[in-house]
Image: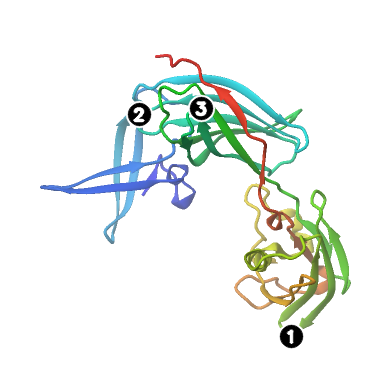
Amino acid sequence: MNFEHNKGDHDPWLNGKSNDIKKVENGFNFQWKMLYPYKSFKENSTLPITIHNINGIKSEWNFDIPIQQEKNRTLAINKEQGYPEDEVKICIKEILTAKVSPSLNYETVEKYMGDDIYILKAVDNKGKVYRFGNGTSLEESKQEDGYHRSVRREMTKLNSTITSLTLYPRINVADSKMEQLLDKKSFALKSKRLNLGLQVNDVTQKGRKLVVDYQLTGLSKNLSKGKLDMINNNLKYAFWLVAKKYINKINPENPWPPKNHGIPFNKVKMNDKATAHFQSTFDLNGEDRIEYFKLENTMLLFDFSSFVPAKDLKPFTIELPVENE
């Protein structure tokens, strides 16, 4: 199905959608639960719905459903918390205490585009823990002080007698992909923001396979098996091969190598875990390929971001005002 005449999986109404179906005497009662994709609610709205497939039967069933907002309460907070070391800040705007799905509205400001700040949990003054669902990004903009993003996240229903909440934020740091033209067999790349590096020892083409021998530098010593498994898995996606003249054609809104001009996956082999020595093999004749492949015309892109765990930021407390009707 799709909503508001959207197409396929890019329909924002499908973000976090869940179903609840109950059999009754003459059929079924069902409920759809979705994240509302807009910043504000339109009075006396209707929601156009198209169902493409019911129980394997393909057709186009069109409905126009009237929707209205149930009365809820708004707790205005407007509490700002800065983290100068990480060059980010969080402003808690309000809590909507809706009957079915209360939500927390907040804004983040980041120096670097792509950093992801989210609230992991909250604990009230009586010790109860509150969890948060998926977030809906309501608005994004670049301003003088950084990249602004307004977010709404569903949360556990609030206890009406509490007076404060302590929030536990976390940040995933983004780092732009590093690039290197494959016109040399060995080279080193260094992350711009993270204390990590990539030492490429050898690049060899073997028929329709490209083999890259390398070591990761700056990793913690004595990594656990779980951490090594995570690194091994992430390396499958950390490398891109992209034809040099198509680098500028990668869409920043939906970054992916252009079709027939990039290879986004590889097979990884660990040579020596003590020295973080790996080998990645790219299939030059696979489903994702580069037409007219030549080493001297190909860029290697490497993403360091996936090798750094999320960082917990210092918790902060917000005072809750008396609820207003």
Which of 316 and 55 lies nearest the eye of the viewer?
316
Labels 3, 1: front one: 3
Which type of secondary structure does the marked residue at label 3 adopt? loop
Residue at 41%, 27% in the rendered image: 159
In this rendering, position of residue 70 left or right of residue 219: left
Q: Spatial distance from mark 2 to mark 1, Cα to Cα?
A: 63 Å
Label of residue 99 in the image: 2
Q: Which mark is residue 207?
A: 1
Left/right of residue 5 with respect to residue 240 in the rendered view: left
Rendered view: 174 above or below 225: above
Asked whether the beta carbons under mark 2 and mark 1 sit within 8 Å of each other, the answer is no
Q: Amino acid at mark 1?
A: Gly
Mark 3 or mark 1, earlier in chain: 3
Label 2 crowd bin: few (<14), some (14–19), many (20+), radius 10 Å? few
Q: Nearer the viewer, residue 230 or 208?
A: 230
Give residue 125's mark: 3
Q: Nearer the viewer, residue 36 or 223?
A: 223
Residue 54, how many percent across, how many down? 27, 55
**Numbered tag placed on residue 312 in the rendering:** none
Q: Say if mark 3 contacts mark 2, CB within 8 Å.
A: no
Residue at 68 percent across and 57 percent down: it is 306
Indicate the amino acid at tag 2. Answer: Lys
Examine the rendered structure and indicate whether residue 213 appears above or below residue 108.
Answer: below
- Label 1 packing within 10 angstroms: few (<14), some (14-19), many (20+): few
Ranked by sequence position, the earlier of labels 3 and 2 is: 2
Q: Give the foreground label among 2 and 1.
A: 2
Dot 2 or dot 1: first in sequence order is 2
The image quadrant that residue 273 belongs to is: bottom right
The amino acid type of the residue labelled 3 equals: Asn
Residue 310 image position (x, y, % from top left): 66, 49
Task: Give the Cα separation between the discs numbered 3 and 2.
Answer: 22 Å
Is residue 164 toward the left or the right of residue 195 in the image?
A: left
